[in-house]
Amino acid sequence: MQYVLMDLEWNGSYSKRAHGYFNEIIEIGATKLDENLQKIGSFHYMIKPVVSKKITNIVTDLTGIEASTLEDGGTFEEAMAALKAFVPRDAVVLTWSNTDLLVLVENCRFFFRRERIPFLGFYADAQAYCQPRIAADVPAGQQLGLTKAGELLGISLEGLEAHRAVDDSELTARIFAATFDKPSFEAFVKRADEDFYKRLLYKPHFISHVGNPLVKPEYLTFECPACGKTLKAQSKWRYSGRMLCADMPCSCGKKYVGRVQIKVLYDDVAVRRKLTEAKPKEETAPAKAEE
Ligand SMILES: [Zn+2]
């Protein structure tokens, strides 16, 4: 099995045709590793943008890419054809978090009118795989940046420019090789089939109303940290900051606010719960009920 670590740079602009903001890919970098994690290839492609010829300051500051840098670039279609030749059919393609993959789908939708990545057979999220093996104490919802991950592993960044696609893909490859463990990684690889795209493009949302059938009663009760009694909402549940919140005074005299965030995923529900002692301001605030 071979591995292709890929990194993209894109330029954001307004597109009439996309009915809004569009992230146009302007640079693709990839590093290919053989089954022994030895580097066997490098890929670099510059794309001359067609949606917006103006490169935003954010992109230029971050990457050093200017409109003139891309003057001799190819088209997105050509870049995809070149990648198809570079990526073996049974290779696993990896990106650091799935953001790059989503931008790639966005570009395929725009240029090919099809939400499919032509060269993708298998995929794995390098960030999701490597992060727990580098910094187990970073919460799952918090993403470890690529440069930071390299630093934590003591990987030399010599000769690499951060935020240029080829160098970022090379750094991802080094991080991947340093954390790789065959059995655990194989369990992590996904085949890019219909279900894969459905999951990828699914938009999670937060439950804003306590009456939603996905809200289980046990999500809504807490335990008083002071006396151990069960706490229930003594106010209406309000929706604030993507969380359901309610006042939860305890009979022992302590006053709390219970907060529950319920995120509806493709085939799962992610629940985050937090109990904090009520600040005097919150106690007296009139309850802004959603119901
Ligand atoms: Zn109590």
Image: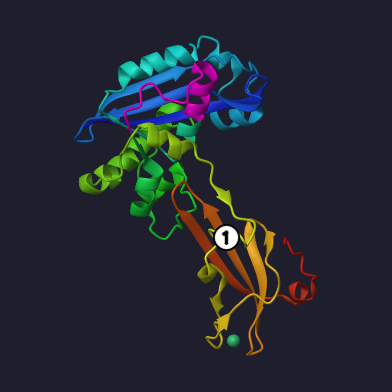
Badge 1 crowding class, 10 Å Cα cut-off, few under 14, some 14 to 19, many 20 or more, is many
The residue stretch that appears in magenta: 103-122
Front-most of 147 and 112?
112
In terms of image quadrants, where is residue 243? Answer: bottom right
Q: Residue furthest top?
A: 72
On the image, the x and y values in percent for residue 115 come to 47, 26
Quarter of the rendering occupied by the N terminus: top left
On the image, the x and y values in percent for residue 151 come to 41, 47
- For the point 23% across and 35% down, the residue is 37
Q: Which residue is mark 1?
A: 261
For badge 1, the amino acid type reads: Gln
The answer to whether 192 is drawn above or below residue 110 in the figure is below
Left/right of residue 210 with respect to residue 74 in the rendered view: right
As for residue 119 lying within the magenta part, the answer is yes
Quarter of the rendering occupied by the C terminus: bottom right
Q: In this view of the protein, can residue 159 be seen by the observer?
A: no
Left/right of residue 89 with respect to residue 286 in the rendered view: left
Front-most of 270 and 122?
270
For ligand 1, tell me if the residue under mark 1 lies within 8 Å. Answer: no
Q: Which SS class for mark 1?
A: strand
- For the point 62% across and 23% down, the residue is 18
